[in-house]
Amino acid sequence: MSFTRRQILTGLAGLGVVGLAGSGARYWLGRPADITTHDYELIAAPLDVELVPGHVTPAWAYGGQAPGLELRGRQGDWLRVRFINNLPEPTTIHWHGIRLPLEMDGVPYVSQLPVLPGELFDYRFQLHDAGSFWYHPHTSSAAQLGRGLVGPLIVEEREPSGFRHERTLNLKSWHVDKRGAFTEFSVPREAARGGTPGVLSTVNGTHAPTLDLPAGQVVRLRLLNLDNTLTYRLNLPDSEARIYALDGHPIAPMPLGKEYWLGPGMRIDLALKVPEAGTELSLRNGPLRLATLRSVAHDDVAGDWPPALPANPVAEPDLQRAETLRFNFEWAGTLSTDAAQGGAYTFWQINGEA
Ligand SMILES: [Cu+2]
């Protein structure tokens, strides 16, 4: 797809007139000299992938891979992502779980207009919190996430954390049939209950891969649930593993235990003491194997458990002055639709309203 810079700039200037003003400067075209930035040019585009051996799945990808390119920055620095939409439909990027100004958060028609095919949008924000986060569209979410538009955003601690080895494990289950063709991303009668889960589990885009880890070392495993419906019952039998952070925020380290229920969008940072070389561990969802973790010989002296990760600078809430707001989350009880909303489903309601 080709487009000229002038056309884009004209398009952006047009947005200002539409009346989204009030949230400050939205587009950065110059480069401030006095701040550290992590610059990415991130392109969303169709990409054929081979999820089922011998078959092509027409996925959509960020940065030429699905799940998408891992974006990394360091706490306190700025993240600058020039996002280019080469998909056949409008989209935005939402940065899941991280603190940032609303105008950077990719909420269509609220914080920005959708980025049209051939357009770009500059996302730019300071990274206040270290941890494991992720990004995805907030337009036609079930379908766009389902096609592969999900990716990790990793923010490193300001000072070295004590982990010398780490690995990101992107969990995604795909809505594909036995020949790799997409099936329905959301079926109303399922969506009204627990959601429409995919059927082919993958870790970093591969079904049941074997991942090599350094024997004798403590490795930080960043496990990201990049699905929008599936809750994983994560377990790692016969392993020594401790939880160091949940949803991007450090906790006092505790044993992983028998299993951990990792809901849609959630993240868990584990420290795993990798056993002696030649051992295989099975990372599982309930009884199903997600990946094999294989320990391979490593020269370094054996590692020990690092200290707890430093807390993120989240303000203490003032509970004395808190207001109480009541929300009833409920299901209408039927597969109801609303003609006034173009026939949209209304079965999920908050205080009686879809
Ligand atoms: Cu999200």
Image: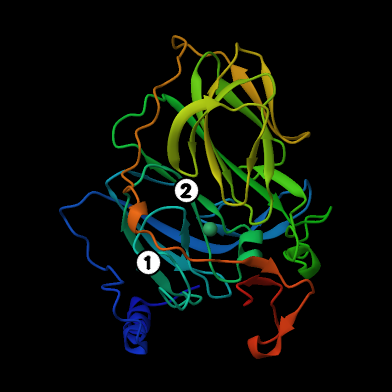
User: Label 2 sits on what residue type?
Assistant: Phe
Please tell me which residue lies in front, 253 or 277: 253
Q: Residue at x 66, y 15 (%)?
A: 279
Mark 2 or mark 1: name the one nearer the start of the chain.
1
Q: Looking at the picture, does residue 349 appear above or below residue 269?
A: below
Tag 1's secondary structure? Answer: helix
Q: Residues within 10 Å of mark 1 (few under 14, many from 20)?
A: few
**Most extreme residue toward the right, as rendered?**
178
On the image, numbered disc 2 is attached to which residue?
Answer: 133
Rendering coords of residue 348 (x, y %)? 67, 70
Does residue 61 appear left or right of residue 346 in this picture? left
Report the quarter where the C terminus lies: bottom right
Is the C-beta separation of discs 2 and 1 under 8 Å?
no
On the image, numbered disc 1 is attached to which residue?
Answer: 102
Does residue 262 appear left or right of residue 155 in this picture? right
Residue 248: image quadrant is top left
**Most extreme residue toward the front, as rendered?**
320
